[in-house]
Amino acid sequence: MKIPKALERVVESFERLPGIGPKSAQRLGFYLLHVPQSDLEDFADALINLKKNTKMCAICFNIGTTELCDVCADPERDNGTICVVEDALDVLAFEKSDKYKGVYHVLHGVVDPLNSIGPDDIYIPQLMKRLKETENRGQVKEIIIATNPTMEGEATAMYIVKQLKAQNSELKITRIGRGLPVGADIEYADEVTLGRALEGRSEY
Ligand SMILES: [Zn+2]
């Protein structure tokens, strides 16, 4: 049996999403056939406007609605401490922990040679550039590397540390860690664990 083209298109779109296999994609596609037309149109509308109505922050590459994200636009935040995270979702997690008063740099991924993602494919060059610019004003006091404690996260952290040290050997670079289980995802860590990991960071 061949499934209708319209349904196939939807299933294929779901299949391209992370963590969704062919079976789940099919299940979701068939499920949507039972959803009222108006809800489907709302869904489609939300997708169409997703990128139109969001902006990447010009400084830290966090996701927001204006040129500068809420964190970068906040004069109360400490610009001298930059926490480097994999995803904008990690920013949300840190903000929820309410322990961090510095600013962020969002990498939008990790170095992952197996999937041919190199340092220049994520926002590492932008981090270096940002530091070079602020460095001249002697602003940045500490870089906290908060990539996930996975193999790719660690490799990315090591790469960034090497680059940072080459650019400025005086810079204080720390790594969050304590309390975060190996292989864990920062995005899913609870506020208390994340707060502790931040407090218990160690210097490179
Ligand atoms: Zn920002």
Image (tube, rainbow, N blue to C red):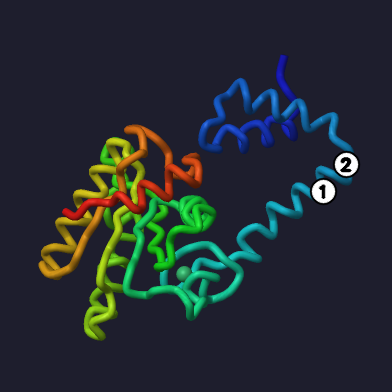
User: Could you tell me the amino acid type at mark 1?
Assistant: Glu
* Mark 2, residue position: 37
Residue located farthest toward the bottom when viewing the structure as drawn: 137
Q: Position of residue 42 (x, y in %)?
A: 80, 50
Q: Position of residue 96 (x, y in %)?
A: 54, 54
* Mark 1, residue position: 41
Compared to residue 172, the image places residue 14 above or below, namely above
The Cα–Cα distance between marks 2 and 1, rounded to whole angstroms, is: 6 Å
Instruction: Say which residue appears at 33% left-offset and 38% top-offset.
Output: 115
In the image, is 4 to the left or to the right of 134? right
Q: Which mark is residue 91?
A: none
The quarter of the picture where residue 154 lies is top left
In the image, is 159 to the left or to the right of 35? left
Please tell me whether mark 1 sits on a helix, a strand or a loop: helix
Q: Position of residue 138 (x, y in %)?
A: 23, 82
Badge 2 density bin: few <14, some 14–19, many ≥20, Cα 10 Å: few
Observer-nearest of 95 and 122: 95
Observer-nearest of 63 and 14: 63
Observer-nearest of 129 and 202: 202
Instruction: Say which residue appears at 21% left-offset and 60% top-offset.
Output: 173
Callout 2: CB less than 8 Å from ligand 1: no
Q: Which quarter of the rendered picture does the C terminus lie within? A: bottom left
Q: Which quarter of the rendered picture does the N terminus lie within? A: top right
User: Could you tell me the amino acid type at mark 2?
Assistant: Gln
Badge 1 density bin: few <14, some 14–19, many ≥20, Cα 10 Å: few
